[in-house]
Image: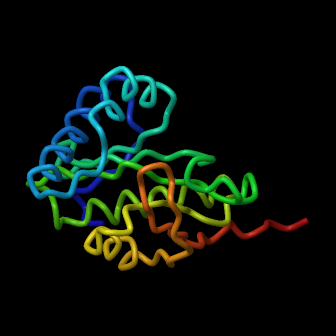
Amino acid sequence: MNEDTRIRQAAPGDATAVAEILHEAVGWLSEASMPLWEAGEIDSVAIRADVDAGCYLIGEISGELGGVLRFQLEDPVFWPEVRERDAAYVHRMAVRRRLAGKGLSSALLATAAARASELGRRYLRLACPASRPQLRAVYEDFGFQHHSERQVGPYFVSRYEYEVRLPAAGPP
């Protein structure tokens, strides 16, 4: 992460910017024939509720809001069989196109991994379209390991996990 990059918890006043970044990603992915999210999944009401609930991290480069990542403590849709409280989960990572390639995705993932560690979670997990090798490479380059594939409704996904370093136990 370069010195001009800052990752922080999204605040209620950031809901519009979070929605704009996600909608920009939807537009870009649709133009590239790689749709990812339905517009209804990222409508302003849902985004505002998620931001207010503290579910989003937001990334800035030189003060410009440029990336987002949804962080959650459970994911019964994509990971129904896993042990509770063993992992944290990330979804909806998006970076503005003009800031792509500047390390913002890695910084968001690193912050999510650190947060998972602070919460005593052993893994950071995610699911992404199995048919998107470039997206999968982003996660693999970060250090995520392929776990499995799964059909979830209309989505065939590859599931990944990243083992986080748990904080060292202090003296007894």
Q: Residue at x 37, y 57 (%)?
A: 108
Place of residue 64 in the rendered image (x, y in percent of width and height, measured from the top left): 17, 43
In the rendered view, tell whether residue 25 sits above or below residue 145.
above
Q: Residue at x 59, y 73 (%)?
A: 163
As drawn, which residue projects farthest toward the top? 45
In the rendered view, tell whether residue 42 sits above or below residue 65.
above
| Figure quadrant of the N terminus | bottom left
Picture quadrant where residue 20 is located: top left
Place of residue 100 in the rendered image (x, y in percent of width and height, measured from the top left): 16, 61
Q: Is residue 76 left or right of residue 99?
A: right
65 vs 62, nearest the viewer: 65
Picture quadrant where residue 167 is located: bottom right
19 vs 75, nearest the viewer: 75
Place of residue 45 in the rendered image (x, y in percent of width and height, measured from the top left): 36, 20
Q: What is the count of numbered marks?
A: 0
Q: Is residue 87 left or right of residue 46?
A: right
